[in-house]
Image (cartoon, grey):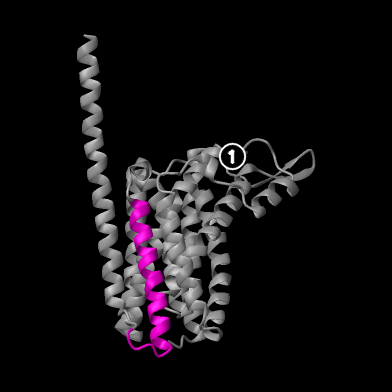
Amino acid sequence: MIVPVWAWIAVIGGLLVVLAFDLWIVDRGEPREFSPKQASFWVAFYVTLAVIFGIVLWIFAGPTSAGQFFAGYLTEYSLSVDNLFVFYVIMTRFAVPKVHQHKVLLVGILMALVMRGAFIAVGAAALSRFSWLFYVFGLFLIYTAVQMIRQHGHNDDDEVKENAVLRWARKVLPHTDDYVGSKVVVKVDGRRMVTPLLIVMVAIGTTDLLFALDSIPAIFGLTTDAFIVFTANAFALMGLRQLYFLLGDLLQRLAYLSYGLAFILGFIGVKLIAEALHSSGVSWAPEVPIWLSLSVIGVTMVITVGASLIKARRDGRESNQITTSASAEQG
């Protein structure tokens, strides 16, 4: 799909306006916690924006491009849910006050979006010149899927390591020991210093970029159109902050999330390799249609979330029965 420059400018400009409005709402007045009602509204708002964009894409570019966008958006959003576990760990490790967590996520994810944009541009250019990279991406996704299954259930704090950028920021940037309201830069004895709030934003942004090492190849397995890849990532990231507050404790109850995401990554990895073989003239290699990819991704997430919630409910009943039995014995 050939996208005119004005379309890029319009989409990026529109996204920045929405994010600026979001940031203005967060910063106006006294900082306050993000309520579940507010989170629900904003999640619905950003999902609606994505749906509207997909419909507009359908009208002007056709059902194939729209289908690629929706499949990519659903994949990126699904993979992003797994990121929330790590975001929770980062927030806890830095003891970020709840009233400032939304701003941290907003700025951190905006940083990640800029870095992902550069990553996408490089990836699209490389794939257009070196077709053998499709095999590399496919094998990498299959490897990531296997590793995700092997590491299932290991979301401990110790496994979240500080990346090089974060270590550099903490070492080089002069920073205060404590938070100073919602400020990211303050003057202390005439010396300009950053607060831990900025350090956490860097942690969120750079950590999300590391997660993009599997999510970007995954969406390139659905489409090589840089415009669709970028917009799917942008809409998924924009709605991620509110999802963090909406899910809350539910994150800990998604027991089978890793299995669902691993299956999606494995499926896309196999799809990439099969389509690369098909393009190379291998007649028996299938070409997977976008509607099938979208169906597999959607059904997998529905089953994953449903099975996780059923398990959580069953575990809750068993826990209550054990507590009741223990109380009866003590009585």
Residue 122 lies in quadrant = bottom right
Mark 1 residue element: loop
From the top left corner, tell me how far across and down residue 266 is, in percent: 38, 65
From this viewpoint, is residue 241 visible? no
Residue at 34% of width from left, 71% of height from top? 71
Whether 69 is drawn above or below 241: the answer is below
Q: Nearer the viewer, residue 28 or 107?
A: 107
**Quick check: 58 above or below 242?**
below
Q: Quadrant of the C terminus?
A: top left
Residue 282 in view here: yes
Q: Is 48 drawn above or below residue 122 in the view shown?
A: above
Determine the residue positioned at 33% across, 78% down: 66
Along the line of sight, the residue nearer the viewer: 137 or 112: 137
What segment carries the magenta color? 257-284
Q: Main secondary structure of the magenta part?
A: helix
Q: Nearer the viewer, residue 142 or 304?
A: 142
In the picture, measured across the screen, residue 78 lies left or right of residue 204, that is left
Q: Residue at x 41, y 59 (%)?
A: 79
Foreground of the two, 43 or 124: 124
Q: Quadrant of the N terminus?
A: bottom left
Residue placed farthest to the right in the image? 190
What is the three-letter code of the residue carrying label 1? Gly
Image position, residue 226 (x, y; %): 48, 78
Q: Is residue 277 magenta?
A: yes
Q: Which residue bears the numbered disc 1?
A: 181
Q: Going by the picture, which residue comes out furthest to the top? A: 331
Mark 1 neighbour class, 10 Å CA radius: few under 14, some 14 to 19, many 20 or more: few
Residue 50 image position (x, y, % from top left): 36, 68
User: Residue placed at 39% from the left, 61% from the top?
Assistant: 77
Q: Is residue 221 magenta?
A: no
Task: From this view, report whether residue 57 is shown above or below residue 237.
Answer: below
